[in-house]
Amino acid sequence: MSAPASPLAGAGARLDATLARGLRRITGSALAPYQAAIVRIGFALTFTVFLLREWPNRSELYGDTSPWSIDLARRLIATNDAFTVLIWSDSRLWFEVVYHGAILAGVLLLLGWRTRTASVLFMIGVLSVQNRSVFMGDGGDNVVHLMAIYLVFVRCGQVWSLDARRARRAAGQDPADPVAGAVNDKVGMALWSLCGALLLVAHASGFADLPFFDQEGLLPLMGWGLLLWGLWALHGVRWCLDRYYPRSQARGVFQIMGNLIHNGAMVVIVIEVCLIYSTAGWYKIQGSRWQDGTASYYPFNLDYFNPWPEVTDVLSASGLLIMLFTYGTVMVQVAFPFTLFNRKVKNVLLVLMMAEHAGIAVLMGLPFFSLAMISADAVFLPTAFLVWSGARTTTAVRRLTGTGSRPSTPTPPPADASKTVALG
């Protein structure tokens, strides 16, 4: 009589197979392409529109007529090692170049044109403007600040971008050659060369303060000079591999590393948003006004956050509404990270949080804070909803522009989306 089979028989093999599938998944493709794209679009739109709205006041906020003078900014930055190119010179011309360059970088990232380069320029623009005058933010600038850094490491142009359209066209011209677009990418090569030339001139002339090694750099011991030159060199190496060694093992390793970096950055974005809500909720719990359910009353009655006094007067006059707003805010913020384990509950709370931020934008006059938070929340949106929304938006645009009403079935990103996107 044979002994009964152990319930653990084959457990090791099953575990190995599961780990192998997971490893193939995170190294074989850049995950969550639609979520990466909506985050890119949201934050690029937020920062660009903010700069455009403040364009008449740009000099008073960040320029030579700002109460926070460049000398004060330099003294503060000497203590916190923040990065901004605006302290390299007190010239009005330099300020205008940087400010309008930040707007241009935001537009390019929004459209998804050469997203690899545009994301780096966008990060430089965001950090330069915000760190020049650190007291000009409303809370949402902190989120934009962080996401601008994370987007550099994300392949955010796989869908809903000019890069994706260029990749599809290149693949259509020569389906047998997966890197045909990279081989003939003269614009990308010119852009890469221009960025390298500008970086070299800035370094060689002594105009730029870009140390190669810094104890307080963005990454441990890595100065901004090493980071920017490293990104520039990696883009060039990738183009060379696409051009001359499209089927080499080195290119395969580059692809795997790129997928790992992208997927890791997306996980960091998710964790960052969870931390924002968790800390906000748990700190609120410790406040007496949040405990007694009256905290929402006070911002409604501050002139600075009261663009619609008639509406807020009605809301703040209701004790029940104030209690619901107060306790509801705390419960949603504390509970949200835990709802990630249940998709349906997560989607419900996601709608509530976005609605809350939309209400803050209207009732408290904080549109850019709200847009930044909604853009961060969008990383949790279901892929099916994003694909559906993209298809409906495409159909609506075609009808408005008179380009026909062709079926707008979304084209999924290629398995190796970066094969046809070179130096951009």
Image: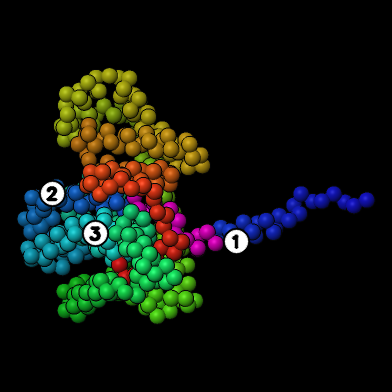
Contact, mark 3 vs mark 2 (Cβ under 8 Å) = no
| Magenta segment main secondary structure | helix
Q: Is residue 170 left or right of residue 205?
A: right
Earlier-in-chain disc, 3 versus 2? 2
User: Where is residue 38 drawn, in percent x and y?
Assistant: 34, 50
Per the rendering, the mark at residue 54 is 2
User: Where is residue 280 drawn, in percent x and y?
Assistant: 36, 40
| Residue mark closest to the camera, 3 vs 1 | 3
Q: CA distance from mark 3 to mark 2?
A: 19 Å
Residue ID for mark 1: 20
Tally of marks: 3
Question: Which type of secondary structure does the marked residue at label 2 adopt?
Answer: loop
Q: CA distance from mark 2 to mark 1?
A: 51 Å
Question: Where does the magenta region start and end?
Answer: 24-38
Residue 416 visible at all:
yes
Q: Nearer the viewer, residue 285 or 125?
A: 125
Q: Which quadrant, please, contains the C terminus?
A: bottom left
Is residue 282 magenta-colored?
A: no
Q: CA distance from mark 3 to mark 1?
A: 38 Å
Callout 3 environment at 10 Å: few (<14), some (14 to 19), or many (20+)?
Answer: many
Residue ID for mark 3: 108
